[in-house]
Amino acid sequence: MDGALVKEIGTKALLLGAGALVVFWTFNAVKLVINARGLNPLVKKFFNQIAAGRIDAAYLLTTKAYRQHVGRQDFLKFLASLQLNRYRNLKSGRPRIEDNQITLTLKLKSEDKQSELPLDFTFKKVEDAWRIDRINKVKG
């Protein structure tokens, strides 16, 4: 009789744990989707500004902290080093929430799909609007 009681309690505990895990995962997934709204239009606007030659407009889509850390000339050098004109397609990864910012890995692919440039964009909300807080080449 003791073995059956232990088995029943263990089964209930396992089901309760699995249920809690599903609730936790669902909550975080919904939170991520709600928090990430507005990132894709910002990314599209950023690359459209660069493609149109409006580098200053793209630079202004960054946070004030970014602009204090990365001067305009450094921003221009960084963009030139990326050779963005080689890439035509953009694939977005899954956003990652860290404190009050979201990091998103974007993969730029060449037209012939032979080369790929992964970039980590970190976004921060400034006055209810997303801004780019950091751009890094992903090493790999």
Image (spheres, rainbow, N blue to C red):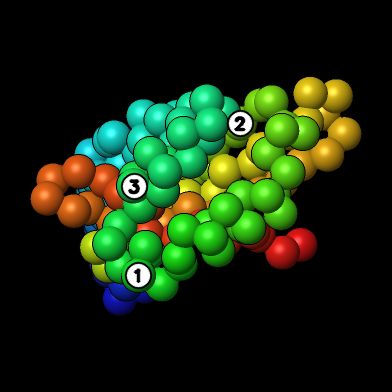
In the rendered structure, which disc, 3 or 2, sits on the residue that comes first in sequence?
Answer: 3
Placement of the N terminus among the 4 image quadrants:
bottom left
Q: Looking at the image, which residue is at 55% across and 63% down?
A: 74
The residue at which mark 3 appears reads as 60
In the rendered structure, which disc, 2 or 1, sits on the residue that comes first in sequence?
Answer: 1
- Foreground residue, 122 or 82? 82
Q: Looking at the image, which residue is at 41% across and 48% down?
A: 59
Residues at discs 2 and 1 in contact (Cβ within 8 Å): no
Residue 122, image x, y percentages:
42, 57
Label 3 environment density (alpha carbons within 10 Å; few <14, some 14–19, many ≥20): some
Q: Residue furthest left?
A: 127
| Alpha carbon separation for disc pair 2 and 1 | 28 Å
Task: Name which quarter of the figure residue 61 lies in.
Answer: top left
Residue 50, image x, y percentages:
53, 35
Q: Looking at the image, which residue is at 38% across and 39% down?
A: 57
Mark 3 residue type: Leu
Mark 1 residue type: Gln
Q: Name above or below for residue 106 compared with residue 139.
A: above
Residue 11 shows in the view: no
Q: Name above or below for residue 6 compared with residue 134.
A: below
Q: Looking at the image, which residue is at 87% across and 34% down?
A: 114
Residue 125, image x, y percentages:
22, 53
The residue at which mark 2 appears reads as 90
- Foreground residue, 2 or 9? 9
